[in-house]
Amino acid sequence: MKKIIAPGICLRAFEAQDAEQFTATVLESVPTVGRWMSWCHAGFTIEGTHEWFDTCNRGRAEGTAYEFGIFAEDGKELLGACGLNLISKMHNYCNLGYWIRQSRQGQGIATRVARILAEAGFKELGFNRIEIVVAEGNELSMQVARKLGALHECTARNRLMVDGLPVAASIYSLIPQQWPALPYQIIVEN
């Protein structure tokens, strides 16, 4: 999957021309996103962006991750990023992750995007399970998981690393048997 289009949103693979906008978006978001994701820091550079884009391209080619930029419907304004990653082919599940640029947080974008990605994960990729793993204390991301109807299964000790330290994380799950179909159609381009 390289692109998913839904009303008002375009999830697409990053392209070289997105590098400056991505770097600026990361730097804008250090106060909020950086609190939970160690890669989001004031020293983030365009070189880091290019490395990330290369990682995304490799993951997509290998089928181990599907990372997307979250763009406005026209595919130009970058709102954040999301992905289906940490894919276990043996057990047919993955992780669903998301972050929204600071200036666009609180507008329901993360919930909408997570719903679209879960739909694609179940319908296009055929996953049996999708996990959302959230560092303890990250209430906004936990709210997104709950709004999706994800089941909170446990709090796992030392599950994530934040600022070089192990932290507990809530593990939420979605399964296709309990997944309500979207009320609109998504268009997936491979």
Image (cartoon, grey):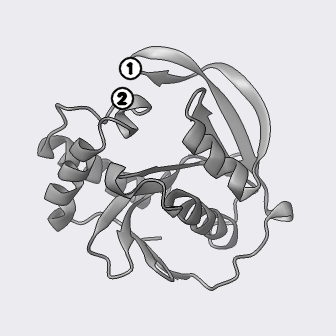
Q: Give the CA separation, mark 2 to mark 1.
A: 5 Å
Label 2 sits on what residue type? Ser
Picture layout, residue 158 above or below residue 135: above
State the mark number for residue 144.
none
Query: Is disc 1 surrounded by few (<14), some (14 to 19) or many (20+) residues within 10 Å?
Result: some
State the mark number for residue 38.
2
- Residue 89 can be seen, yes or no: no
- Residue located 49% across and 62% down the image: 109
List x then y, in percent, for residue 8: 46, 80
Query: Is disc 2 surrounded by few (<14), some (14 to 19) or many (20+) residues within 10 Å?
Result: few
Helix, strand or loop at mark 2: loop
Picture layout, residue 110 above or below residue 119: above
Asked whether 3 or 169 is in front, the reply is: 169
Q: Is residue 67 left or right of residue 108?
A: left
List x then y, in percent, for residue 13: 35, 66
Helix, strand or loop at mark 1: loop
- Residue located 53% across and 64% down the image: 113
Label 1 sits on what residue type? Asp
Asked whether 24 or 50 is in front, the reply is: 24
- Residue 155 can be seen, yes or no: yes
Residue situated furthest right in the rendering: 177
Q: Is residue 88 left or right of residue 41?
A: right
Which residue is identified by label 1?
163
List x then y, in percent, for residue 104: 38, 58
Task: Mark 2 and mark 1 in contact? Answer it, CB < 8 Å.
Answer: yes
- Residue located 45% across and 75% down the image: 9
- Residue located 44% across and 23% down the image: 162
Picture layout, residue 153 above or below residue 113: above
Residue 141 sits in which quadrant? top right
Pointer 2 or 1: first along the chain: 2
